[in-house]
Image (cartoon, grey):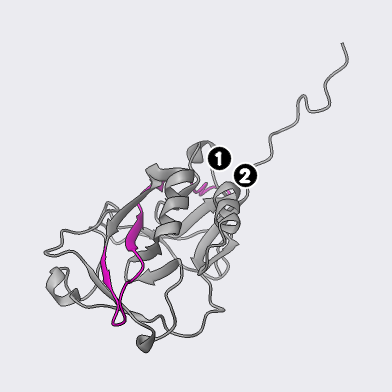
């Protein structure tokens, strides 16, 4: 029997992207967390060490959005150790891979009336996906569980496909960067989401 054209061929590894900010947007966003000091999170809002999640907060985050403070916020904004996302950004993330993300709704208001809904967002899935034997990496070890890869300019990463499985968005263990696949990128592009950039996940940049 003749072999089928694709028989014996290795399945092509999925394309992976590092998700970051769109640095073409130069103006500062027109919003501020009005009750940040009252949240009880300290000077920086960070995920608890060792596990991605929101820290305990004393109040619901309250966001003032107004053009007097700067440009209108886009769908994906950086806020300390987390992201601030629009309602439509949340919808896309939940539709493509809801198990990989967590959300905390903010109270929003504007000096001129109604304000759009925004959420604090965290990419909570952390996967041990870096093939250290084939990658060019240096692991910094301070003797605790908080190890990380050195942020060397010449670092390169090879991902273990079997560790990714069906995940569409995740953080790499010891690397912390947010990584997504083609399906997530395509969904964000199709929805016309603003504020994101998709770069090379395989090298530092």
Looking at the picture, how far across and down is residue 47, in whole percent?
26, 60
The image quadrant where one finds the N terminus is top right
Q: Secondary structure at mark 1?
A: helix
Is residue 128 covered in magenta?
A: yes
- Reply above or below: 49 against 204: above
Q: Residue at point 53% right, 77% down?
A: 23
**Which label was assigned to residue 147?**
none
Q: Is residue 6 visible?
A: yes
Q: Residue furthest right?
A: 2
Q: Secondary structure at mark 2?
A: loop
Q: Is residue 170 visible?
A: no
**Mark pair 1, 2: CA separation:** 8 Å
Task: Report if the CB atoms under discs 1 and 2 are less than 8 Å apart.
Answer: yes
Q: Which residue is mark 1?
A: 161
User: In the drawing, does residue 66 fall left or right of residue 200?
Assistant: left
Q: Which residue is mark 2?
A: 14
Q: Residue at point 15% right, 76% down?
A: 37
Which mark's residue is nearer the viewer, 1 or 2?
A: 2
The image quadrant where one finds the C terminus is bottom right
User: In the drawing, does residue 37 fall left or right of residue 135?
Assistant: left
**As rendered, which of 127 and 169 lies closer to the eye?**
169
**As rendered, which of 32 and 139 lies closer to the eye?**
32
Q: Residue at point 45% right, 66% down?
A: 75
């Amino acid at each position: 029997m003749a072999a089928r054209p694709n028989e014996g061929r290795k399945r092509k590894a999925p394309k992976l992207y590092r998700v970051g900010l769109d640095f073409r947007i130069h103006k500062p966003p027109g919003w501020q967390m009005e009750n940040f000091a009252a949240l009880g999170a300290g000077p920086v809002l960070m995920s608890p060490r060792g596990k991605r999640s929101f820290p305990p907060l004393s109040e619901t985050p309250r966001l003032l959005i107004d053009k007097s403070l700067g440009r209108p916020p886009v769908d994906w904004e950086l806020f300390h150790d987390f992201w601030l996302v629009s309602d439509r950004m949340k919808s896309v993330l939940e539709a493509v891979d809801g198990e990989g993300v967590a959300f905390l709704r903010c109270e929003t208001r504007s000096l001129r009336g109604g304000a759009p809904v925004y959420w604090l967002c965290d990419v909570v899935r952390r996967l041990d996906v870096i093939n250290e034997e084939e990658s060019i990496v240096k692991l910094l070890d301070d003797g605790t569980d908080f190890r990380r890869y050195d942020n060397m300019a010449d670092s390169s990463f090879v991902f273990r496909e079997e560790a990714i499985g069906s995940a569409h968005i995740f953080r790499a263990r010891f690397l912390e960067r947010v990584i997504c696949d083609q399906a997530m990128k395509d969904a964000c592009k199709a929805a016309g989401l603003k504020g994101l950039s998709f770069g090379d996940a395989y090298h530092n940049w």
